[in-house]
Image (spheres, rainbow, N blue to C red):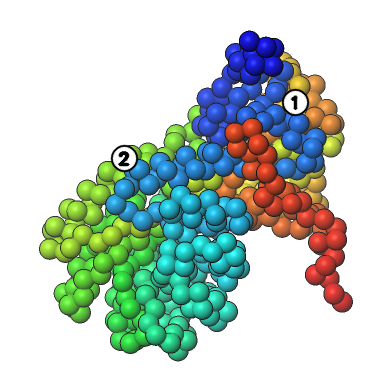
Amino acid sequence: MTLAELLPTMRSMVQARLESRVWPTGTTVDAHGDLRVGDLRVAELANRFGTPLQLLDTTDVRRRCRAYRAALPHAEVAYASKAFLCRAMARLVADEGLSLDVCSAGELAVARSVGFPAERILLHGNAKTPEDLKAALALHVGRIVIDSLDEIDQLGALVRDRQRVLVRVAPGVDGQTHASITTGTDDQKFGFPLSTGAAAEAVRRVLAEPSLGLVGLHGHIGSQIRKVASFEEATRRLIGLMARIRDEHGVELPELNIGGGHAVPQLPGDEEFDLAGFANRIEVAVHDECHRHGLRVPRLTIEPGRALVATAGVTVYRVTAVKNTTRRWVAVDGGMSDNPRPALYGAQYAVRLIGRPHTFPTQPATVVGRHCESGDVLAREVPLPHDLRAGDLLAVPCTGAYHHSLASNYNMVGRPPVLAVEGGVARLLVRRETEEDLLRRDVG
Ligand SMILES: Cc1ncc(COP(=O)(O)O)c(C=O)c1O
Ligand SMILES: N[C@@H](CCCC[NH3+])C(=O)O
């Protein structure tokens, strides 16, 4: 055996697998701080592609898509594209046999540009514009999820043949997540509350609109929800409404979409969402309730977004300054423009020094971004090596969902690139935004 042949084996002997659930599966690190994602050295990628850099381990994404399909073999799994969308992602989702949830003409345009099967696309949104609706109809998307009485009229007027629709219901279930991403309760903007009779009224109105074909109900109770019991309760309530619809209108709806929202571990030590338990308990709930009401079992759809991509993503920053004042402030070359989640939801992240040995002792550090706000904090009081200095590289896991898609150009900072890493090969999916990009729209 030559040395070149031996090298990968020797390397794998010294590389320890990062067991923590917040990193892409198969991520390794060694005593020299050599972090490898998708079998590539992250420090090398940072040098080659610059920082901040968003990595997406596409093997990890595929694995999760397959895990969902295997756990729920009879259900439709629709990827909620708001979590992260680009053309390569849409292609991957199509290849894996998933459907796609979009909520704007823009997301639809990405799907259309790769020829995503329109039949497998669902359009959502509480404030769909005429452009959103027209784009969806022009593409002949499979289903549109109705979110207001106005939308029934607007869509009814635009449809030429017939459009299949679902009615979005707020089932009155609190998923116990951050208030800004709670959508199952009555007092929030999405859907029609079940408890007030608004959902039943919306169903009546849709059934009276000849150009709309009501195929089911939809209930998405929020995001980053840990408890399976919340989904179970929502499912039971939605089936209860299906039974009332059958009783009142003689219509048995063939589809039940219970949305997404499955939590991911944000910090090492956080629990993983119990996918097997979810699959089992939802199936039991659906069968029980349908049996109890004498309903045919509808086809189930779920719409995970975060759960498919969050932990496949790693963001790499370079330290620009370390300042010891009231505390140890570690400033990096990104911030709330690539990750507004700490500011929006108080989200917490782990941070790891990479590219050189992880020295001890560690000391608490508050990692902050480059933006002109005190709230631009990426991680508060996290343990980082005592000798951390400008030029060091920091890796932040669990950044694959709602990072790129929530990114902004605050302070005229260009958005980072997204680099797919898979089996030792790096492929640029979205290039870095340049000053030229930023100036292109400024036509005054
Ligand atoms: C209608 C709908 N479906 C699915 C999702 C996906 O949520 P998550 O990424 O938490 O799975 C969302 C976002 O919360 C949504 O609004
Ligand atoms: N943007 C939120 C999730 C919103 C879910 C979309 N309905 C987050 O980053 O957690």
Q: Nearest to the eye among marks 1 and 2: give it.
A: 1
Q: Secondary structure at mark 2?
A: helix
Q: Position of residue 165 (x, y in %)?
A: 37, 74
- Residue 254 as seen in the image, left or right of residue 262: left
Q: Which residue is mark 2?
A: 277
Residue 45 at x, y percent in the picture: 74, 35
In the foreground, 369 or 122: 122
Residue found at the far front of this picture: 1
Q: Tell which residue pokes out farthest to the bottom in this image.
A: 157
Q: Above or below — where is 222 with respect to 37?
A: below
Where residue 364 appears, as percent x and y from the top left, is 70, 27
* Residue drawn 44% across the image and 36% down it: 272
Amino acid, disc 1: Gly
Q: Earlier in the sequence, mark 1 or mark 2?
A: 2
> In the image, is residue 182 above or below residue 441?
above
| Circle 1 crowding by C-alpha within 10 Å: few under 14, some 14–19, many from 20 | many
- Residue at the spot of label 1: 355
Left or right of 360: which side holds 111?
left
